[in-house]
Image (tube, rainbow, N blue to C red):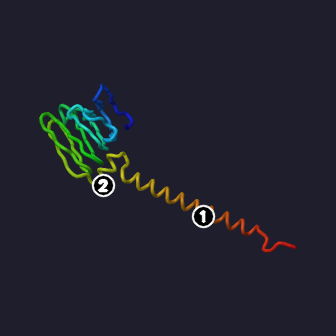
Amino acid sequence: MRERSALTITEVPGRSTIDLDSGKVAVAVAKDKMRPGEQIEVKTPNAVAAVRGTVFIAEVIRASASANNAQGGTTANFYVLTGQVAVTSGTQVITVGPNNFATVTGGIVNTGIMSPAMRANAAGWPLRERHAEGQRRRERREADRDEYDRSRRSRRARRPLSRPR
């Protein structure tokens, strides 16, 4: 769950529901842990995602009213990493497979294949940050190796070449 996300989790026998009002939540459902007939749903203001044996990310973006957007609006994004999600908006039911996404704005549903940038952003790691973190890790490893090499050289220098008998 991302910071500033607003959600409610409700559980009744056979059904778990996550009502996502705003923000982002990642959901991982192990199909082998579910009993027959059990359901897990993620509800957003304008769509519902039914899940079974899936890893996906749901995001709700609420647009504020402005001159360009008189009524404001809500966009629900579903990013499927593994498995499948059935997204329902109004009477439309769309099955979204792995490495695909569905965007619901009002009653309009768009789907497609996730780009690497979209996948990284969905997971909360913009590519620049991920690249920078990798670079920092490489630099730390290199510094650690250099320090280790220096300590080995200094230990060797302190050892006498031969021991007196």
Outermost residue, left side: 91
**Residue, x 49% and y 56% (percent of image)?**
136
Whether residue 146 sits left or right of residue 87 in the image: it is right
Q: Which residue is mark 2?
A: 116
**Residue, x 12% and y 35% (percent of image)?**
91
Whether residue 145 sits left or right of residue 33 in the image: it is right
Whether residue 89 sits left or right of residue 152 in the image: it is left
The alpha-carbon separation of the residues under discs 2 and 1 comes to 34 Å
151 in relation to 44, above or below:
below
Q: Quadrant where the C terminus lies? A: bottom right
Q: Amino acid type of disc 1? A: Asp
Q: Which residue is mark 1?
A: 146
Image spot of residue 142 (x, y percent): 54, 62
Q: Identify the secondary structure beneath mark 2.
A: helix
**Residue, x 30% and y 26% (percent of image)?**
13
Outermost residue, front side: 36
Image spot of residue 99 (x, y percent): 26, 51
Image spot of residue 72 (x, y percent): 21, 33
